[in-house]
Amino acid sequence: MSRFRATRSGQSFNNGKNNETVTSRQIGFSKDIGATAKQVFTYLGLSLMSCGVVLPPAIASQPTTAETNLSQTSPAFLPFHTIPQDVNPASREDDYTLGAGDQVRIDVFDIPELSGTTYTILVDGSLNLPWIGKTSVHGLTVEQAAALLSQRYARFVRDPLITISLLAPRPVRIAIVGEVNRPGAYITGQTAGGTITSEANTTQIRTVTQAIQAAGGITQLADVRNIQIRRPRIDNREEVLRVDLWEFLNRGELNQDRTLRDGDTLIIPTISAIDAAEATRLAAANFSPQSISVNVVGEVKQPGTLSLPSNVSLNQAILAAGGFDRSRARVDRVQLIRINPDGTATRQAIEVDLSAGVNAETNPPLRNNDIVVVGRSGLASTGDFLNTLLGPLNPLVGIFSILRLFGGF
């Protein structure tokens, strides 16, 4: 049976093989054949349904008055209906929404001339499609766009089954500001073939954590509980979405790792108070930088600048520098110098306890560009003072020793 509709006498349609003009007599004749066919399909449908088989919409007949009356007494003859899908763009916030530049493929089941074609969504967010013309899909998910096209093609095709495949997503431009190591603008780029480019500030960004990774990870002052996404809307208003990555880390709440859209601004605020245990946990997350730079100077065996894991503690940094020089170092106290974002520096005396776990008092977690100063012990300080004081006399002492050898004195 043909799936194309005839809506008025004498109207021409292409059935995929030959152009045919449908007349009133042909329509009446086809109705007689259709009535007989419906009886056959009704009997066949009853047999198949008793076996648990459901006829597809393409061959399911539209219910007549007799069938409607019969369906009221027998559940097996309930007519087939297409359940409309929600086409509200805000119904599933985290789904990818279509926009200008997306490359999609559209397939209509059992209609080859409408299938297999690749389209690029135009600048105004529309698709120029055969039979139905220009159709806007901007802001719709793939499923919502397929439902919309099904409604449009239903004028020409009975119960159209339409599939939309996203072949290449459009470039997505976002801004990342706040407590990240490299704030700025980032773009998900694509070439004509749909591959992602590797230019500066161009990477594969789809979610909040991917965006933070692209920006070098969070700083240790980041408030991951109150991240904001500022999203422009079609009506020129701004929507603010909140993200709690702490819930994402602790409970695996994947809905907190929201999908970003074109034009989003991701804001990472500054935390007011830092908990040492939480800082260590966050430093191990994949959206934190993999390493930080720490300077360990003074009385250690290997002083210098070290590249250490981002969750490193004071004790680990000292051990990474070779440990204390026991003959000279003061092993009970060190100085921690921290460079603040505003350019100022703070100095803190830390009572060292190499057996302690991570805590703010004796073994705090370190931040990027921290400086650890290991001072001299009292004995080493005295020895250095005497060497400084007696240093100018060393040449004279050497001359007297030589003269004594020759018996001069």
Image: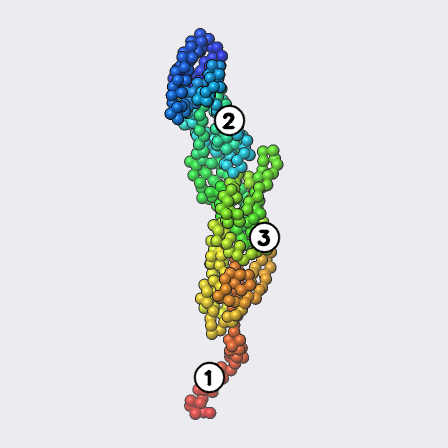
Mark found first going from the N terminus, 2 or 1: 2
Question: Furthest residue to the right?
Answer: 237
Mark on residue 271? 3
- Disc nearest the viewer among 1 and 3: 3
Q: How far apart are marks 2 and 1 (CA)?
A: 103 Å
Residue at 52% across, 35% down: 92
In the picture provided, is 112 more to the left or to the right than 68? left
The residue identified by callout 2 is: 84
Q: Are dots 1 and 3 in contact, CB under 8 Å? A: no
SS at circle 2 = loop
Question: Furthest residue to the top?
Answer: 25
Q: Position of residue 234 (x, y in %)?
A: 58, 33
The three-letter amino acid code for the residue at tag 2 is Pro
Q: Where is residue 65 in the image (x, y as percent from the top left)?
A: 49, 14
- Disc nearest the viewer among 3 and 2: 2
Q: Position of residue 340 (x, y in %)?
A: 58, 58
**Residue 357 shows in this picture:** yes
Residue at 54% across, 58% down: 276
Residue at 41% across, 15% down: 39
The three-letter amino acid code for the residue at tag 3 is Ile
SS at circle 1 = helix
Front residue of 98/273: it is 273
Mark on residue 323? none
Quadrant, the N terminus = top left
Q: Residues within 10 Å of mark 1 (few under 14, many from 20)?
A: few
Image-quadrant location for residue 113? top left
- Disc nearest the viewer among 2 and 1: 2
Residue at 51% across, 34% down: 97
The three-letter amino acid code for the residue at tag 1 is Gly
The residue identified by callout 1 is: 398
Mark found first going from the N terminus, 3 or 2: 2
Q: Position of residue 60 (x, y in %)?
A: 43, 20
